[in-house]
Image (spheres, grey):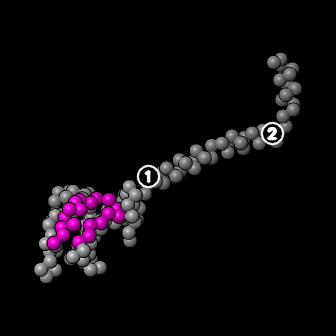
Amino acid sequence: MKNSEFKRYLKMIRPFDWIIVGLLLIGAFIPYGIFAYHEHQQNVQPQNILTAYVTHDGKQVYKVQLTNHEGKTTYRYNDGDDWNVIEVTDNKIAISEANCPDQVCVRRGQISKAGETIVCLPHKLLVEIKSSTNKPDDGGLVTE
């Protein structure tokens, strides 16, 4: 391309064309800014705290935070002749012993994700894990 042809093309471009090109370049980077801001907001949000609630016949009888829990904690719930032993090991909770006839609650094993539950129907005992952000872990159900 010769110098005279280049000058001829430059004369065809008007000042408003440069403004349009500049706005298009700026607009091309707007999605990057939005995604960077969104990513930053997700990193700033508080940690998801998991808490296990033990309820008997709808009334809370025990509560323990599972997030950052270390070691083993044992809680025994008695209601007349009925009893259940609840064990918290690190960030998991389970009913380890019960005097109910079917032992479904004991066979359930440990739970550790928001929305998971252990139910002892004969004793009307419920162990459930709730999240501080009300977001389920790995597809669990949100409970309030």
Magenta stretch secondary structure, dominant:
loop
Instruction: Give the extent of the magenta segment.
Output: 101-120
* Dot label at residue 43: 1
Q: Which residue is mark 2?
A: 17
Question: CA gap, disc 2 to disc 1?
Answer: 40 Å
Residue extending farthest bottom: 80
Q: Residue at x 21, y 76 (%)?
A: 122
Left or right, 28 with respect to 15, comes to left
Up-down: is 1 above or below 55? above
Q: Is residue 32 magenta?
A: no
Left or right, 104 with respect to 81, comes to right
The earlier-in-sequence mark between 2 and 1 is 2
Q: Residue at x 85, y 25 (%)?
A: 7
In which quadrant will I find the C terminus?
A: bottom left
Residue extending farthest front: 102
The one of 131 and 112 positioned closer to us in this rendering: 112
Up-down: is 29 above or below 69? above
Residue 119 in picture, x, y percent from top left: 26, 70
In which quadrant will I find the N terminus?
A: top right
Residue 8 in picture, x, y percent from top left: 87, 26
- Could you say which quadrant of the image residue 74 lies in? bottom left
- Amino acid type at image mark 2: Asp
